[in-house]
Image (cartoon, helix red, strand yellow):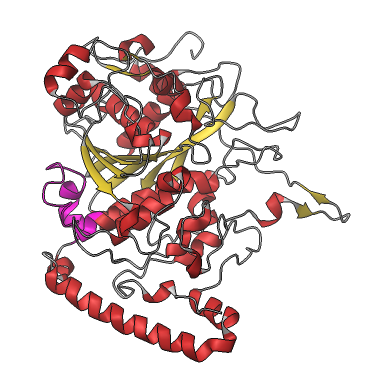
Amino acid sequence: MASATSISYTFIPFHKTHKESNPKSTITQSTKTKPITLCMTFKEANKTAMSPTATTTTTRQQTLEQEQEAMQHIFRKKSKHPKEHHNKRRLRHVWREIQGENDWAGLLDPIDPILRLELIRYGEMAQACYDAFDFDPFSKYCGSCRFTRRNFFSSLGMPHTRHGYSVTRYLYATANINLPNFFRQSRWPKMWSKNANWAGYVAVSDDEMSKRIGRRDVAVAWRGTVTHLEWVADLMDFLKPLSANSIPCPDPSVKVESGFLDLYTEKDESCGYCKYSAREQILTEIKRLLEMYPNEELSITITGHSLGAALAILSAYDIVETGLNVVADSRAVPVSVFSFSGPRVGNVRFKERLETLGLKVLRVLNVHDMVPKSPGLVFNEHLPAAVMKLAEGLPWSYSHVGVELPLDHKNSPFLNPNGDAICAHNLEALLHLIDGYHGKGERFVLATGRDPALVNKACDFLKDHYLVPPNWRQNENKGMVLSHDGRWVQPERPKLDDHPEDMHHHLKQLGLATSYDI
């Protein structure tokens, strides 16, 4: 039997610098139930599975460790950002640069180590939307968030030292939208909601985290869809003006994909959760939070993966276009988007309008992923400007926005180079690529100690000899618990918050209140 290669010895050991990294914590499903250990540490796995060849395994691990130390030395020697220089730079001093003040010039090749950590941190916020979402159609709560917002990050086992944010608002979208595979519905006759799905959350950094990052950060994370990719082909795939859905824009030729726009702006007044549109929910919450901290340095950071990345760009545009980020003393709060594996959202005029407004967008993608290539497979930003000028009136002429950071999963020695389309689109895999990327042509070396086993949480992408089972992240007993009378049942969950009492007040101030709201 061949010995297994231990992943724990194939990254740069920066553990002393980044104590907050705790890859084991993602296995914990809830603080209310005892978690099941789904994946042993790699040392334990080697010891258990390879006991007949323990000596060989130990020798191989020692060899790998020596090789990694040599690789680390070479990497640090070649790096344009020596470690001593890294230790002098702190996020609180350079956060505007990291948020894209200069369009990330000089930070991507080689990648700035602080930017790398921030991309992973916000990517984990987007990943939390998947980890917390109830996908199970046999659950009466299918389509909702599995946790209350007060315990959101702790229920996911995300360390407070790394994610010092409090979730202040859940976002809901109406399921009466033609976007396949984004919405989930329960098979139970009595469910939590027939017309709503949980779509993400708004969070704000606490005092300790705000001090560490240099400002009070309002973060928004949008959920995407990761289990199917058919929605790319099934998109309505035609552009329509933003003004058609009552989003203010001085240029009627600024257009976005109709499905994204409807998801963002539609509502269902018969449903308590989506009687307000996702747009109304996010704008009122951003307004409320900015008013809570009038004398502080502030930032607004919006993130999302896949379809959630499209919603992140659209909502960020809306915040800046409406001037919501301009506070009482006339300061403009910087708005940034960290987009992961996102599709194109609008036409060339939309891109130009974003640039005029000063909105900063950094798009991270896997070059083998089909989603960032859609929609607009024919008419897009890769064509000559003259051709795009002629095609700008077409309802399927799209253009990407912002700055692009392209990554290639074939550069990672951990991943199967022949992984399928869903693997190439996987967010955990993309965070793994960010961790190992150091610049074009540079050696792939994991820099933060982030566990590669996370890649296989919801796909089968790691090479087999790492002995990490595919799709290993499961809810304990699929949510079933043993009742007092000895029967296995689905427990009741606390009622999810719908909308705050001051919603009407903020809607009126924004000029969005309707007769129904009043």
Q: In the rendered structure, does residue 263 fall within the stretch colored magenta?
A: no
* Res 159 seen here: yes
In the rendered image, residue 133, in percent from the top left (x then y), is placed at 55, 42
Where 385 sits versus 340, above or below? above
State the residue at coordinates (58%, 86%): 51
In the rendered image, residue 305, in percent from the top left (x then y), is placed at 40, 40
Magenta range: 90-115
Q: In the rendered structure, does residue 111 fall within the stretch colored magenta?
A: yes
State the residue at coordinates (23%, 41%): 404
Residue nearest the viewer, comparing 459 with 356: 459
- Give the residue at the far bottom of this rendering: 55
Quadrant location, the N terminus: bottom right
In this rendering, would 43 be left or right of 335? right
Residue nearest the viewer, comparing 8 with 491: 8
- Name the image quarter holding residue 16: bottom left
In this rendering, would 392 be left or right of 462? left
Residue nearest the viewer, comparing 222 with 350: 350
* Res 207 seen here: no
State the residue at coordinates (30%, 31%): 316
State the residue at coordinates (49%, 14%): 517
In the rendered image, residue 257, in percent from the top left (x then y), is placed at 36, 20
In this rendering, would 60 be left or right of 350? right
Total of numbered circles in the picture?
0
In the rendered image, residue 343, in percent from the top left (x then y), is placed at 35, 32
In this rendering, would 38 be left or right of 221? right
Residue nearest the viewer, comparing 364 with 2: 2
- Name the image quarter holding residue 193: top right
Where 79 sits versus 228, above or below? below
